[in-house]
């Protein structure tokens, strides 16, 4: 007897408890997600170094989600300077958003054929 069915009639309690025992609980949904992490280091002409990281995830169908950040993002506290989010479909389009400057960009990769030449 399950205490959660205490308010039900005896016949209903028997049915509900039997259903609870006989119905297997589904396994929790599990999914593996992989990220490609690429650190980078730059040295300018004045020999000042700066670093950053790019984290990307393949969404399938040649679509990639990328997050790019530099050391300016975390230097002196967490900021949005040099923080970028890119949504790219190779050969088709790029949706870029520079969060620190509130600057979205859309790049369309198009071509046209004239006679036997592709432009």
Image: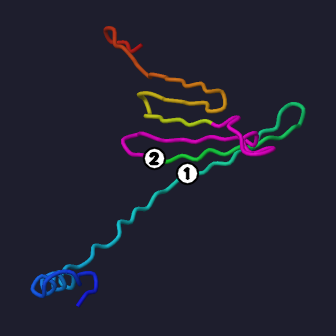
- Closer to the camera in the image, 94 or 84: 84
What residue sits 43% from the left and 34% below the top?
89
What residue sits 54% from the left and 24% below the top?
105
What residue sits 40% from the left and 62% below the top?
31
What residue sits 42% from the left and 39% below the top?
63
In percent of width and height, residue 71 lies at 75, 43
Q: Are marks 1 and 2 in contact (CB under 8 Å)?
A: yes
Q: Is residue 45 magenta?
A: no
Instruction: Tell me the quarter of the picture where residue 116 sits.
Output: top left
Give the left or right position of residue 117, taking residue 100 as reference: left
Query: Magenta segment range?
Result: 59-83
Give the left or right position of residue 55, taking residue 106 as reference: right
Which quadrant of the rendered structure holds the N terminus? bottom left
Helix, strand or loop at label 2? It is strand
In percent of width and height, residue 74 lies at 74, 45
Total marks shown come to: 2
Which quadrant of the rendered structure holds the C terminus? top left
Instruction: Tell me the quarter of the picture where residue 69 sits.
Output: top right
Gap in Å between the C-alphas at discs 1 and 2? Answer: 9 Å
Q: Is residue 69 magenta?
A: yes
**Label whose residue precedes the other's in the sequence (1 or 2):** 1
Give the answer, above or below, for where 115 lies relative to 5: above
Which numbered marker is on residue 36?
A: 1
Coloring scheme used = rainbow
What residue would you read off at disc 2?
58
- Closer to the camera in the image, 89 or 26: 26
Give the answer, above or below, for where 94 lies relative to 14: above
Give the answer, above or below, for where 52 lies relative to 116: below
């Amino acid at each position: 007897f399950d205490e959660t069915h205490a308010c039900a009639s005896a016949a209903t309690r028997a049915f509900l408890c039997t259903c609870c025992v006989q119905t297997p609980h589904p396994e929790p949904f599990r999914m593996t997600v992989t990220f490609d992490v690429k650190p980078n280091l730059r040295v300018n002409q004045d020999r000042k170094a700066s670093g950053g990281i790019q984290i990307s995830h393949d969404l399938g169908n040649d679509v990639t989600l990328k997050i790019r950040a530099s050391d300016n993002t975390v230097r002196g506290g967490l900021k949005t300077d040099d923080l970028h989010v890119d949504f790219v479909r190779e050969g088709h389009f790029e949706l870029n958003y520079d969060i620190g400057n509130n600057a979205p960009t859309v790049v369309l990769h198009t071509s046209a054929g004239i006679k036997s030449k592709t432009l």
